[in-house]
Amino acid sequence: MTSLPPSVTARPARPALGPTARRLLSICGALLTALLCALSVGASPASAHAALTATDPADGAVVKTAPSQVRLTFSEGVLLSRDSVRVLDPNGKRVDTGGPAHVGGRSSTAAVALHSGLPDGTFTVAWKVVSEDSHPVAGAFTFSIGAPSKTKAKVPSDAGPDTTVETLYNIGRYAAYGGFAALVGGCVFAGLCRSSRPVQKLTVGGWVTLFSATLLLLLLRGPYTDGKGIGGVFDLGGLGDVLSTKPGAALLSRLLLLGAAAVFLAVLFGSYARRAADADPRRRQDLAFGLAFGGTVVSVGLAATWAMAEHASVGIQSALAMPVDVVHMLAVGVWLGGLGALVATLRAGEPIERAAVRRFSRLAFGSVVALVLTGVYQSWRQVGSWSALTGTDYGRWLLVKIGLVGVLLAIAAVSRRWTARLADGPAETTVETTDQATAQVNEESEEDGGNGESGETAAEPAEPADSEPADPVRTAQLARQKAAVAKATTLRRRYGDLARGSLYRSVVAEAIVAVVLLAVATVLSGTQPGRAASAGAKASGAIAESTPSVDPISVEIPYDTGPKSGRGKAVFMLDPALPGDNLVHVFLFDRADRPVDAEEVKVSLTLPKKNLGPLPVPLEHLSAGHWSAKSFQLPMGGTWRLSLTVRTSDIDQVTETRNLKIGQ
């Protein structure tokens, strides 16, 4: 085996970090400190996920006459569809007319008209809207006309997206981020550093991934926001509704921009690559200027399709946040996508000039600075306080992201050190020639015997066309030798010197961390920002302070159905014991306080003063001696009469009653 030159066979001492690497770490440390300081600066509350703040009629209210409309007010602007607000009468039939609309041009409101001549009873309002940052939210409340009554209206307990649709949608979002990074970073690397077949494959793969993911998101958008199953992708009417919304328009714009990006790729890897050796440098320079201008416009446009439809478009300082988000996206794409291009080049064993690697290193450094600067602002805007940083899901995921960025920067510092060592060596990469590799393979083949044909080499010329057909065994042996030569040559190009091999390994480590970082960024983009979560918690606390504090009701009721085995006690629990939705539990115990089953347990509640009831509680048997109702609606407070019936056999049963003060 040919030995490597002395300059690379002897492992040099580990050099100290260069001034550029030290400057990078200093800047990142300062920016991280600025981020933590910014988190302690308060600002006015802002919400990036819509929350219902008021209704007319109010939740649980009893009105004397039928209202002409139902009105909802949210904490921020919402997007409405045909079925965003549904009003159901006590029989479960819709009584709203037409679609919902904003009131007075305010996007934070929704109102729907009602039929005239509505009967007395309890009405259910089910609503489902989309926040301006593209996230669906839903809920329900009740009001009564004249007096409360029983209702047959059924509202799905899980108003969120279908599980399959949500999973596919999240996969599409992650793939879109990854495709964008590969597309933008690959193009920048090809234009400024080195264009090669592996880089072209990565960039085109990024375009295909981004296009496919965007198309998937557009088809799934309707089912995702409406809570429908996967079959909703075939609803053309729903697709039309999606295109009329801001997120739908952003996805459609992205598809159109990707059409222009396809033309850009054809020129970049076609005409521009062919003019690499053009005798007229001015023609190549003019083409390079056109590609730079067009590529910048397309890249900014693609990044803007995220900024205009997600967190940056709502909340405080949205006019500033959107261009900052565009710069952030572009910095991520140039850095992480460029890393992928460098990995692909080094892995394929493609020759790459040290100057090109250093050029990408400087480009990545600038991207990191832009990334951290814009990240500081975004973090302050979306988190806003120390409590939100550590006490909300968004803040905790942000800490994970910051940690991953720190790891990525540490690995990048190592990569920059090996890049500097590349610059210290000769101008050409130290790689053994194909002839040397072939000779080595042949020597190894002779040592192994090689089926008695070891004396033949892969470089032997082919037999003349008019000669006898070649021996299949000999042909297969030559093919294996050629494949071994090609693999050996690639490996020598990749690991031909210490600096190149070490650079490859550190860049691969960067790329692995970058994949995880993109996943965390995807989760963050779908998580309610910490500032909004904190504001919502404060609003809930204010509502709780204005509402009388009521402890859940727990009543122990002895029972005796007659026989000795029919004696025991029942524990009835009502939580939170307020008008509205309640959780009901019933436990049965024998005289030794052991859980015991019964043939049947029934519970009903009656409000004698309002002549309301009895209202049966739909109990479900969960385990031995345990029955529960996950959702039981109490229309109003008052002194309710509880009736508990326990049947232990076909003929043995007893009914016990107790008075419960609820909401008083």
Image (cartoon, helix red, strand yellow):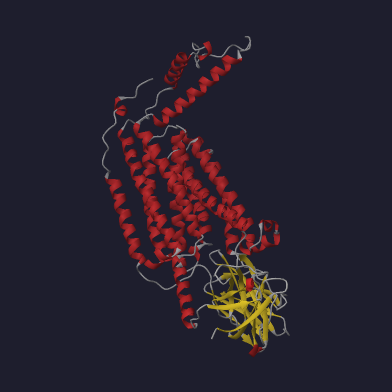
Q: From this viewpoint, which residue is outermost toward the front? A: 564
Percent x, y for residue 395?
A: 42, 62
Location of residue 421 (image quadrant):
top left
Can the viewer see residue 568 in this picture?
A: yes
Compared across the picture, whether 365 is left or right of 169 comes to left
> How many discs mark residues in the rendered view?
0
Question: Between residues 298 and 575, which one lies in front from this camera angle?
Answer: 575
Location of residue 579 (image quadrant):
bottom right
Percent x, y for residue 137?
A: 57, 67
Compared across the picture, whether 599 is left or right of 569 comes to right
Please report the residue visible at 44 percent of the width from the left and 29 percent of the height from the top: 491
Percent x, y for residue 219?
A: 64, 56
Q: Is residue 151 above or below residue 353?
A: below
Q: From this viewpoint, which residue is outermost toward the top? A: 467
Q: Is residue 265 above or below residue 239?
A: above
Please report the residue visible at 55 percent of the width from the left and 71 percent of the height from the top: 77
Can the viewer see residue 285 in this picture?
A: no
Please report the residue visible at 45 percent of the width from the left and 28 percent of the height from the top: 490
Compared across the picture, whether 3 is left or right of 315 comes to left
Question: Between residues 390 and 53, which one lies in front from this camera angle?
Answer: 390
Percent x, y for residue 179?
A: 53, 48
Question: Between residues 332 and 50, which one lies in front from this camera angle?
Answer: 50
Question: Between residues 280 and 163, which one lies in front from this camera angle?
Answer: 163
Q: Is residue 280 above or below residue 472?
A: below
Location of residue 571 (image quadrant):
bottom right
The quarter of the picture where the N terminus appears is top left
